[in-house]
C-alpha cells in the first residue's frame, strides 16, 4: 500500500478528498487538491483530486443553469407586477425543482460511491470527464 507524504495511504487521502467534496465545500476541497497537485507524485491520486473538484464545479454549473429558468420566470413576473399583472408557469418551476433535487441526490450518491471506492484506489469511469482530465494532465 503506497503512502502519501502525510503518512496515510494514498487511498485514504483520495477518499478524504471525495468526502470533503461532498461535506466540506469548495475551500477545503481546493486546499486538499492544491496540496495533492503540489506535493504528491501518485498519478491516481492526482487525477482523483482533479476529478473531485471538476465534479463539484460540474454539478454547480448544471444547478446554476437550471436555476436560470425559474429566475427568468420570476423576472418576467416582476415586470408584469409593475403593471398590475401576474405571470407564472408553475409546471416549469416544479419540473426544474424536481430536476435539481434529482441532481443533488445523484451528486451525493456519486461522491459517496467514489469516496468508498477510493479506499482501494478505485474510481468510477466518467468518460467525458476522464478524457478531459487525461488530456490536460499529461
Image (spheres, rainbow, N blue to C red):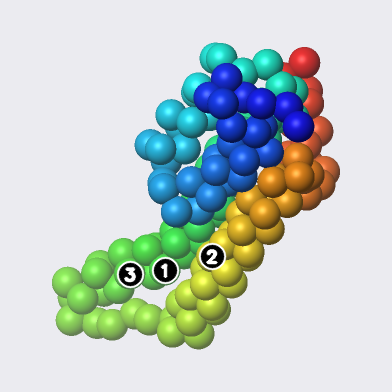
Quadrant where the N terminus sits is: top right
Task: Return the mark for residue 74.
Answer: 3
Badge 3 or badge 2: first in the primary sequence: 3
Q: Secondary structure at mark 1?
A: helix
The reply to whether discs 2 and 1 touch (Cβ–Cβ < 8 Å) is no
Q: Vertical placement of 128 versus 9: above or below?
A: below
Q: Secondary structure at mark 3?
A: helix
Question: Which x, y percent locates residue 24?
Answer: 41, 48
Mark 3 vs mark 2: give the one in front. Answer: 2
Question: Which x, y percent locates residue 130?
Answer: 78, 37
Q: Nearer the viewer, residue 82 or 43?
A: 43
Q: Residue at x 50, y 57 (%)?
A: 63
Q: Residue at x 59, y 36 (%)?
A: 13
Residue receiving disc 1: 70
The reply to whether discs 1 and 3 touch (Cβ–Cβ < 8 Å) is yes
Q: Is residue 8 left or right of residue 2?
A: left
Q: Quadrant of residue 40?
A: top right
Amino acid at each position: 500500500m503506497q503512502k502519501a507524504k502525510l503518512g496515510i495511504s494514498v487511498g485514504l487521502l483520495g477518499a478524504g478528498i471525495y468526502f470533503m467534496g461532498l461535506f466540506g465545500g469548495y475551500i477545503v476541497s481546493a486546499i486538499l487538491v492544491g496540496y495533492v497537485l503540489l506535493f504528491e507524485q501518485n498519478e491516481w491520486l492526482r487525477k482523483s483530486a482533479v476529478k473531485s473538484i471538476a465534479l463539484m464545479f460540474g454539478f454547480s454549473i448544471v444547478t446554476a443553469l437550471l436555476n436560470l429558468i425559474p429566475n427568468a420566470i420570476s423576472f418576467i413576473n416582476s415586470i408584469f407586477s409593475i403593471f398590475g399583472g401576474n405571470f407564472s408557469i408553475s409546471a416549469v418551476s416544479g419540473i426544474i425543482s424536481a430536476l435539481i433535487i434529482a441532481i443533488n441526490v445523484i451528486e451525493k450518491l456519486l461522491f459517496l460511491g467514489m469516496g468508498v471506492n477510493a479506499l482501494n484506489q478505485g474510481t468510477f469511469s466518467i468518460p467525458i470527464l476522464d478524457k478531459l482530465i487525461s488530456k490536460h494532465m499529461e
